[in-house]
Image: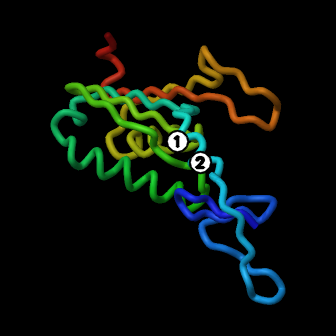
Amino acid sequence: MKVCSECNAVFDGRKWRSTPETDRHGVAVLEKTLCTACKRMRDKVVLGTVHLDGEVIASRSGEILRMIRHEEEIERARNHTSRILDIHSSGQKMTIRTVNSLLAIHIAKQFKQAFKGRIDIFKDSPGHRPRSKQDEGTISVKWMQNPQKQD
């Protein structure tokens, strides 16, 4: 087995997990390495981008950041690679870059559920194409609180 030297996730030969599994003698045999998520964070690989646009972004910024981090926590429990690379905010606009494309979609869906509005999902955004069918493509998601007031 391998263990990530950054986040301590364990790779059992098939999947990265948060907790180590032991061999038949009850001993975990671990080799230090970096997991997929930590490599993506280190290399700043962006597979998901969320663009948020709405009055709620400026008026309730603390609540918005807690909501985003909470969604990351929930998704990370399901999928080890669900991580936020960075968050940039300016007025009533916010951009969240993730190292997992599904996390971007889940964040946008939470905003639609909480604050209504509209989401648009764009798969395989310009600048990146999956190397194979098993590779993850990029996702760009836009949530607008008031879609009729577009730029």
Query: What residue lies at 21% left-to-right and 47% top-to-bottom?
Result: 62
- Tell me where residue 55 sits by quadrant: top left
**In the current view of this chain or complex, which residue is farthest to the top?**
151
Tell me the number on the disc at residue 37. Answer: 2
Query: What residue lies at 61% left-to-right and 63% top-to-bottom?
Result: 9
Residue 80 in the image, given as x and y percentages of width and height: 60, 56
Name the side, left or right, on which 135 lies relative to 117.
Answer: right
* CB atoms of marks 1 and 2 within 8 Å: yes
- Look at label 1 and name its amino acid: Met
**In the current view of this chain or complex, which residue is farthest to the bottom?**
25
Would you place residue 60 above or below residue 147 in this image? Answer: below
Q: Quadrant of the C terminus?
A: top left
- Tell me where residue 2 sits by quadrant: bottom right
Q: How is the image coloured?
A: rainbow
How many labels sit on residues? 2
Would you place residue 129 above or below residue 94 in this image? Answer: above
- Look at label 2 and name its amino acid: Ala
The residue at which mark 1 appears reads as 41
Name the side, left or right, on which 83 lies relative to 64.
Answer: right
